Amino acid sequence: MVTKNQIKLVVSLQQKKYRSQHGLFVVEGAKTVNEILEAGLKPYKLFVDEPNKAENFNGVEVVSKSELKQMSSLSNPNGVLGVFYIPNVKKTENTDWLVALDAVRDPGNLGTIIRLCDWFGIKHLICSLDTVDCYNPKVLQATMGSIGRVNVVYMDLLDYLTKTSLPVFGTFMDGDAVYQVKMPKTGIMVMGNEANGISNEITDIVSQKITIPQFGPETTESLNVATATAILLNEVRRS
Amino acid sequence: MVTKNQIKLVVSLQQKKYRSQHGLFVVEGAKTVNEILEAGLKPYKLFVDEPNKAENFNGVEVVSKSELKQMSSLSNPNGVLGVFYIPNVKKTENTDWLVALDAVRDPGNLGTIIRLCDWFGIKHLICSLDTVDCYNPKVLQATMGSIGRVNVVYMDLLDYLTKTSLPVFGTFMDGDAVYQVKMPKTGIMVMGNEANGISNEITDIVSQKITIPQFGPETTESLNVATATAILLNEVRRS
């Protein structure tokens, strides 16, 4: 039995405000719920809409299809919904590269970047306060279990970058070709907003401007922020 | 005045079958229509739903909001719709690297890959016959004008790769680390299906298996095909 208050709680978690207030977030779909469990995140409640789906999960609650539909944010709910505790933020370390995002707004881009950090062993991802929330359902869909392995920290990015002792790298159209730049052992790679790039205030703090060279005809569109992050993390690791 | 038959034609172009039959495709939104025009593709008809939007386009037809809505595939049409001729496919050349896709199904991935080819100056993109159609509206949204600058060719990929004289590269979990592989001046980079990777038949033809090393903890998810393409094209060009 799921109570009306529980349904109300789950629905409220579609909004960032209530996710922060309750310290909880929602994941839908057997595959993603499994990935998040495997990544070691602690479930608060797991719901399935058929008894046979319950076998795969400990402590799961079987609810009716209509109850699950009420809790779901999907037009076609897929029968498995997990509510998880938002993990505690860990202290960042200066012993390796970090990635910092300046106002990345697209959930798919943030999700892809978290997954890339996971692949390339980047433990800490610093997000400016106006970057999209990493517990947004569309972000979670793109990150899969990576959200449990990368420490995502929201903070005043300008303040953080002003105080850090690490070299700050940023991507610009007029930077040095990344192939010619010697990558240090540690640093911060700043990635900018989809439409406007890195903000002026943060540009002033960047100690090394780099660019991914363009080989095709001059096009108006720059690389997407997620594909640029893929290339730059590969450059950091290969060096 | 737009006739009923014209509306019917435009709506039919949402399906690949009719796009092929008429040799036409549809693009929506001022920005994307402009990008496609700038890329040199030939318009068949351009429609806007307000006279003031007509200033920006030659030979445009002003229709009513309701007529534009009937032609649009969007729930909120944005007032500019272009019908373009599908460009003739050009003969592929063996003088540079080519990219080949084996059953890439996600429109966003194909769109991102076309844009990456454009950025890295890859002129020819070979797609297996079961790869998503590049004139699918969701692909066009992700490619922007790049579709006019990259020659996308659909063909029997197995047959093509069997006959080519170029070295065939493919990404596998058990390949050689890409940083250790000497990249030749020309070659074909094969990228596989989102869920299954490169098919067994095509694996047999691959002359060099490569891998993008993983630096993080062992995760179940591999890199997304579009981000992997970004990294590999960067590797091809940097060498």
Image (cartoon, coloured by chain):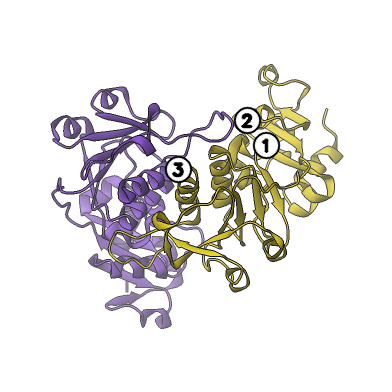
Chain colours: A yellow, B purple
Whichever of labels 2 and 1 marks the residue nearer the N terminus, that label is 2
Whichever of labels 3 and 1 marks the residue nearer the N terminus, that label is 1
Say which mark, if any, is on residue A148.
Answer: 1
- Front position among marks 2 and 3: 3
Residue at the image point whose x is 32% and y is 26% from the top: B199
Above or below, A209 relative to B206: below
- State the image coordinates of residue A29 (x, y, percent, origin top left): 62, 33
Mark 2 to mark 1: distance in Å? 9 Å
Residue B67, can we see it? no
Rendering quarter of residue A202: bottom right
Residue type pointed to by label 3: Arg
Task: For mark 1, name the chain.
Answer: A
Question: Share a chain, discs 3 and 1?
Answer: yes
- Determine contact: label 2, label 1, CB under 8 Å: yes
Residue at the image point whose x is 67% and y is 58% from the top: A165
- State the image coordinates of residue B58 (x, y, percent, origin top left): 28, 78
SS for dot 1: helix
Task: For mark 3, name the chain.
Answer: A
SS for dot 2: helix
Say which mark, if any, is on residue A238.
Answer: 3
Label 1: few (<14), some (14–19) or many (≥20) C-alpha neighbours in 10 Å:
many
- State the image coordinates of residue B200 (x, y, percent, origin top left): 31, 22
Say which mark, if any, is on residue A35.
Answer: 2
Residue at the image point whose x is 75% and y is 36% from the top: A83
Rendering quarter of residue B87: bottom left
Whichever of labels 2 and 3 marks the residue nearer the N terminus, that label is 2
- Determine contact: label 2, label 3, CB under 8 Å: no
